[in-house]
Amino acid sequence: AAGVIAEGVSKQYGGTNQTQALLNVSVSIQPGQFISILGPSGCGKSTFLRCVAGLEKLTAGSLQVGQDPVKGPPDNIGMVFQRDALLEWRTIRNNILLPVEFAGKRKEDYRQRVDSLLSLTGLAGFADSYPHELSGGMRQRASICRALVDDPRLLLMDEPFGALDALTRDQMNVEMQRIWMQTRNTTLFVTHGIAEAIFLGDVVLVFCPRPGRIVEAIPVDFPRP
Ligand code: ADP
Ligand code: ADP
């Protein structure tokens, strides 16, 4: 697991609006921490994750993941979005193996890794199923497996359970805590749910809009099982 250091990160989008999405964001995230990110729509939460992933060019400031300054496209960073983006024509196993393929590694070497992730997320037995055979919650579990398959330095989750019904979302939060306790990935987790932010996070970062900046970094002292 890698830590993240942001120093004075600002991001202004081009185009006609010239939106200042982030202004002077500084934060230090320890390796293995679970960071919840809260804030109203449009306050730059997704932009911040994309900057950390190296998918956006900063207007000012610097970002470091582990020992390395963030420069180009993501280097083994797991990402999970609100929409699961599973490929419908691929089995669950072959969906989970996509990052392995992209990295040019041998899929055969990851057979056991996939199996253990499937059992970790309660999907044992679904390796050869297709995405349409799974419920929304199960599809997001498969997305989590895909994000974790190549042992990423960082796990970035952008409202991963936002499209699920309330009951499934609650179950997924409990599930997520269990997965994190096993893997101890450094995790940045964007959510609109205050309760789940506090339930899951070691620290809750509260973003404020216009322009996007961190107004609070609240350490959570909430007993874990
Ligand atoms: P959040 O994830 O908190 O809802 P975003 O990071 O998506 O916020 O957006 C922050 C601000 O930047 C918003 O005003 C949004 O409209 C703007 N924005 C996001 N992406 C782009 C883009 N690619 N081009 C121009 N403006 C953008
Ligand atoms: P796998 O390795 O899991 O069998 P592939 O990615 O090789 O899956 O795809 C299986 C087949 O589906 C290939 O013949 C591929 O060309 C085809 N395919 C590719 N894109 C699409 C698509 N958008 N919809 C349906 N089938 C597709």
Image: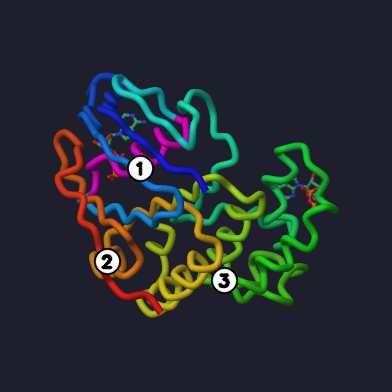
Q: Earlier in the sequence, mark 3 or mark 2?
A: 3
| Residue 8: image tag | none
Residue under numbered circle 3: 138
Q: Nearest to the eye among marks 3 and 2: give it.
A: 2
Ligand 1 image-quadrant field: top left
Q: Position of residue 101 (x, y in %)?
A: 75, 43
Crowd tier of the residue under label 1, counting other residues whose Cα lies within 10 Å: few below 14, some 14–19, many 20 or above? some
Residue shown at the point (42%, 28%) measured from the top left: 56
Mark 1 → mark 2, Cα distance in angstroms: 19 Å
Ligand 1 contact, mark 1 (Cβ < 8 Å): yes
- Count of numbered circles on the image: 3
Q: Secondary structure at mark 3?
A: helix
Against 120, residue 1 (above or below) is above
* 95, above or below 209, in the image: below
Amino acid carrying label 1: it is Ser
Pointer 1: what residue?
Answer: 46
Query: Circle 2: is it few (<14), some (14-19), or many (20+) Cα within 10 Å?
Result: many
Magenta-tinted stretch: 41-55
